[in-house]
Image (cartoon, rainbow, N blue to C red):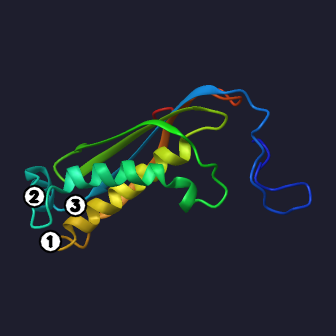
Amino acid sequence: MSELTHIGPDGRVRMVYVGAKPVTERVAVAQGKISMAAATHALALNRDTKKGDPIAIAELAGIMAAKKTADLIPLCHPLPLTNVEVSITSHDPDALAVTATARTTGKTGVEMEALTAVSVACLTLYDMLKAVDKAMVISGIELVSKTGGKSGDYHKENK
């Protein structure tokens, strides 16, 4: 395992210096899911609740969150994102799957932006549907893949 880059030799936290790193195309994909009662799942897929379309609103919230990642995660670099896509699909009869892809051309990766997009999209789905199902469970938020940068590509192995 590599050393933690956010801790300096003096033991203090630091924002990693990326000024000397080359600019490369960087892409990260993250996923997660929110489990719910079958009736709640059907309501979400109907895309018409008193609050509006929970899927469209959650996808938009995920995109907006990716753009604010550096405001939420203290040592993240603010990045000029070139694209963020959030997709919410049915996953079994009792869950929705959330996938986010973040892209930039820069000196540091977009893993945190993709993970933030998934997290906030899941939280938004919870908020949109909690009136009918407070027992929903958000789980499995993880990095699926990332490309670009010094550390090379990563693709999660299926177990």
Which residue is farthest right? 10
**Residue count near mark 1 (Cα–Cα under 10 Å), binned few <14, some 14–19, many ≥20:** some
Q: Residue at x 32, y 46 (%)?
A: 98
Residue pointed to by mark 2: 43
Q: Looking at the picture, which amino acid does disc 1 mark?
A: Val
Q: Residue at x 45, y 33 (%)?
A: 158
Which residue is farthest front? 80
Residue pointed to by mark 1: 132
* Quarter of image, res 147: top right
> Measured along the vertical axis of the image, is residue 31 above or below residue 74?
above
Residue 36 numbered mark, or none? 3
> Measured along the vertical axis of the image, is residue 158 above or below residue 47?
above
Spatial CA distance of label 1 from label 3 is 10 Å
Nearer the N terminus, badge 1 or badge 3? 3
Q: Looking at the picture, which amino acid does disc 2 mark?
A: Leu
Residue 93 numbered mark, or none? none
Question: In front here: 108 or 45?
Answer: 108
